[in-house]
Image (spheres, rainbow, N blue to C red):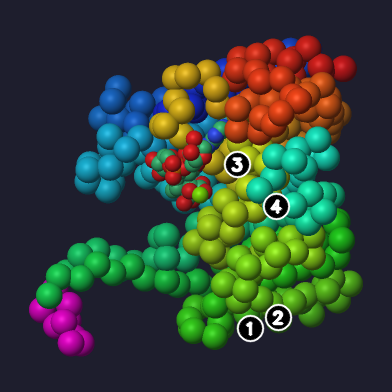
Amino acid sequence: MKIAILPGDGIGPEIMNQAVKVMNALGEKFETETVPVGGAAYAAQGHPLPESTLKVAKEADAILFGAVGDFKYDTLERSLRPEQAILGLRKHLGLFANFRPAILYPELAGASSLKPEIVSGLDIMIVRELTGDIYFGQPRGVRAAPDGPFKGEREGFDTMRYTEPEIRRIAHVAFQAAQKRGKRLTSVDKANVLETFQFWRDIVTDVHKEYQDVKLDHMYVDNAAMQLVRAPKEFDVVVTGNMFGDILSDAAAMLTGSIGMLPSASLDANNKGLYEPSHGSAPDIAGKDIANPLAQILSLAMMLRYSLGKTEQADRIETAVKSVLKQGLRTVDIFEAGTTKVSTTQMGDAVVKALA
Ligand SMILES: NC(=O)c1ccc[n+]([C@@H]2O[C@H](COP(=O)([O-])OP(=O)(O)OC[C@H]3O[C@@H](n4cnc5c(N)ncnc54)[C@H](O)[C@@H]3O)[C@@H](O)[C@H]2O)c1
Ligand SMILES: CC(C)[C@H](C(=O)O)[C@@H](O)C(=O)O
Ligand SMILES: [Mg+2]
């Protein structure tokens, strides 16, 4: 079994070091290959997703990804920007189903920006479609406006689109996830305004016929954003498109205390996957050894569970994470009075020590 390790930029390498340390402490030999991606790959090889990196990712059984991006690359032409690496990997590998679980560990109730009674016991799963939508729709670009009151002026444009098979397959994934959990699925769309998302709603409703044991409801994305902070525990599984899922999962992350707590799994049709924290490269705190490595470490656990079938090892890691939180160890993003502030490295070491 081979694991591709892609640390990336910013805090990526710092948090990846902690996850690799945890993996090496499991007492099992994993074959790994570490390759550059994002800004680091652009700096070294002139492209954010070099052919050699893509090849290693394609040939691996699973990919552990850190984060990409740095504001210093924001002026590069789009195809060379670090973010194209993660978008390219998702597209090239067909990783259409993105699972972002937002779980509040009881010890972190006070770190959430919401009142403890609103978030305690929170356990929701956001299923985000990852290879379609306005992220990938063509045409896109900047041109002279072809019509309207500003005809001839420069305009930027993108295309939102979803084909029926794309909606069907993510709906199946989401219904099946709901069947394994609380049997409730909320499909989030903007059917009141957008054709793409009326179509989305119609297809999800049709797929529901095959999952009558799951209670389906539909919610507009603006209301969903509000409900997520009003009464997040009302949700069980949420399924939505690429862009809405991007935004809602960052909001859900904060309910758990910090975006540094939110792992993710991006799977293809055969459960081959890429595992990464839901957050970015956090250039504002990079190089300081203060980033929270738990989302990366929990992404490793998801990889062992979903792609490598190593449930027991995944359990060991998740239990160790709970244990360090119980011990009161906190990186700065989840720190509160009465707990012990630790660095990225110290948090990684503590998880290793807590492995049973
Ligand atoms: N999948 C990815 O690789 C990915 C995801 C999101 C953003 N990005 C990129 O990352 C760069 C920075 O973007 P951004 O600032 O909007 O989002 P970000 O997620 O990197 O950071 C947002 C805020 O959260 C904090 N934060 C993030 N992860 C943290 C952690 N593990 N521990 C403690 N604090 C943490 C950051 O310090 C920052 O204040 C951009 O180039 C963006 O495109 C990459
Ligand atoms: C970096 C960016 C392309 C990415 C996205 O928008 O999907 C990120 O925000 C994420 O959530 O993984
Ligand atoms: Mg995002």
Q: CA distance from mark 1 to mark 2?
A: 5 Å
Q: Position of residue 213 (x, y in %)?
A: 89, 72
Q: Label 4, label 3: how many angstroms apart (C-alpha)?
A: 14 Å
Query: Residue 67 placed where, x, y %?
Result: 48, 34
Q: Which residue is mark 3?
A: 259
Disc 3/disc 1 C-alpha distance (Å): 33 Å
Q: Secondary structure at mark 3?
A: helix
- Residue 311 lies, in percent from the top left, at 83, 33
The amino acid at mark 3 is Ile
Q: Earlier in the sequence, mark 4 or mark 3?
A: 4
Q: Secondary structure at mark 1?
A: helix
Q: Residue type at mark 1?
A: Asp
Q: CA distance from mark 4 to mark 2?
A: 33 Å
Q: Is residue 51 visible?
A: no
Segment colored magenta: 144-152
Position above or below: 346 against 85: above
Question: Which residue is at 62% across, 80% downward?
Answer: 201
Q: Is residue 148 magenta?
A: yes
Task: Say which mark, if any, is on residue 202.
Answer: 1
| 145 vs 248, nearest the viewer | 248
**Foreground: disc 3 or disc 2:** 3
Q: Quadrant of the N terminus?
A: top right
Between disc 1 and disc 4, the foreground one is: 4
| Circles 1 and 2: CB atoms closer than 8 Å | yes
**150 and 66: which is toward the camera:** 150
Q: Residues within 10 Å of mark 1 (few under 14, many from 20)?
A: some
User: Which disc, if any, is residue 114?
Assistant: 4
The reply to whether callout 4 and callout 2 are in contact (CB within 8 Å) is no
